[in-house]
Structures are given as C-alpha cells and as structure tokens.
Amino acid sequence: MRIAVAARRRHRFGLSVFFLREASFLAEPDLCERYAVPALRGSLTYSRFFVDGEVPEDFREKYMRAIRLRVIKPLVADEEDLERSGWSKLGEPFELDLTYDNVFYNEFIVLGLRTDRWQIPGPMLKARVREAEAAYLAKKGREKLGRKEKADLKESVARKLRKELSPVTRVVDFTWSLNEGVVRFFTHSEKAGIGMTELFHKTFGLRLIQQSPYTLAERIGLSKAHESAWQQIDVTVLAKES
C-alpha cells in the first residue's frame, strides 16, 4: 500500500509551505518516521530558484543515472583536491547509495548537497611545519630554506596531517518540485547557491534562475500598465551583507 503524507511548517511571517512525500509501507509501521524529510525540520530558511527548461518524459530513469554519476566522492588525503561537492541522500549525508525510493517523493526530487573540505587548524600546521623545517635543515647542514623547499615541505606536512584528520562536511538540503518548476535550496549562502546551480546544470542539463522581485514578476506576467509602473520602481537597499 502506498500513502501520501503532507508535511507543513509555518515560518515567522505566518505563511505556510507544503511539501508532499510518498512512503511505501510493507511491514514497517515506522517507515514514515525514518523517511522524515529534514528540509521540513526547524526554521524554514531557503532560497528559491525557477527551473528554465523542459523535463523529459523519461526523467526518472535519465535523472537517476545522472544523479548517481554526480554523487559526492569522499576526499582522500593523498589527492590534490582540497574541497569537493556532490549529491547525497537527503538527511543522511554519508549515505551515498541513492535509490529511486530515497530520491523521488511524489512530485519532488529530494537530495542533499554535500561538500567536504580539508580544514587543518592554522596553529597545528604552523607548528608541524616549523618542526619539519628544523629537521630538514639539520639533515642538510644548512641554515636557510629556499622558497620551493618551504612550499614542498608545507605541502608534505599538510598531506600527513590530512591523514590524521577527517574532512569537514557541510550539507544543504535540496528539493525540486517538478510540478511547480521550483527548486528550494535550504541556505542563503551565495557561494553554496552558485555551487548548487552549477551542479544542477551538470546533472539535469537545465538552468536555474534565482527568484527575485524581477524574475518573479516576469514569471507570473504583468499587464502593460503594471509593467510600465514596474519599470519606474527604484531599488532601495535596506541592508548590506557584511
């Protein structure tokens, strides 16, 4: 038996947003709870993007293949990449075995955008580099290091430290309402938004347009009188990002 579940959250302005998710019940009464969508928990903060382009008829199979190709590949200490992003299961960033059941919910595609980054504490890196430089100079019987030698030693120390540490992981929830043609990305970070739009284009072959008063007006359509009045509106900045 299949059951459609509606989840609702009210944000501080008193508006409501609904997301539908579909769970399959076999002999597990707690399945719905295990599949709870994290994007609906806590404060409702997200950026909206309009999808520019048509979804193909065989989108489930096509998109599933594309998503699996762009699942995040965990960082490895010996590799050159210091940061990497990719898709993961919504609400479980370390679950990378994506299936139809945990990607498609009714009219929605739901994913997590996971980013891994090596972040070595500055004081630790400096201390280890000083130790490595002193040992190198003692071995060579010298007093100073060349610029390239310093860079090579620092990179060698950083690589060793990465083997002792774990990457810092950050994940942002992502939902795409196929019926609305709207993506909700649960952060206002500009950098994260740019990374998501690039990955979205690579995955689905479609372009995203971030919602603003202008793009929203264009989307809903305005009468000639309203369009004329709209063109005369001056932009007022109420707050600047630090």
Image: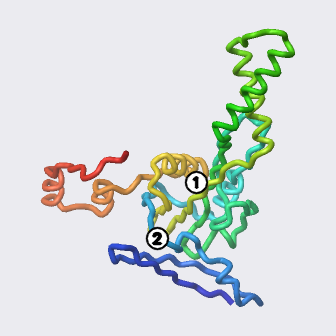
Compared across the picture, whether 156 is left or right of 67 comes to: right
Q: Residue at x 65, y 56 (%)?
A: 87
Q: Is residue 142 above or below residue 55?
A: above
* Mark pair 1, 2: CA separation: 28 Å
Q: Residue at x 17, y 49 (%)?
A: 234
Compared across the picture, whether 39 is left or right of 181 comes to: right
Residue 204 — which label? 1
**Residue 48 location in percent, x, y?**
42, 60
Q: Quadrant of residue 162?
A: top right
Q: Name the residue tied to disc 2.
A: 43
Q: Residue at x 18, y 55 (%)?
A: 230
Residue type at mark 1: give it.
Phe
**In the picture, which quadrant includes the C terminus?**
top left
Q: How many neighbours does mark 2 have within 10 angstroms: few (below 14), some (14-19), or many (20 or more)?
A: few
Q: Is residue 182 above or below residue 106?
A: above
Residue 27 — which label? none
Q: Is residue 16 above or below residue 178?
A: below
**Residue 23 location in percent, x, y?**
65, 81
Residue type at mark 2: give it.
Ser
**Residue 38 location in percent, x, y?**
58, 71
Q: Is residue 12 above or below residue 51?
A: below
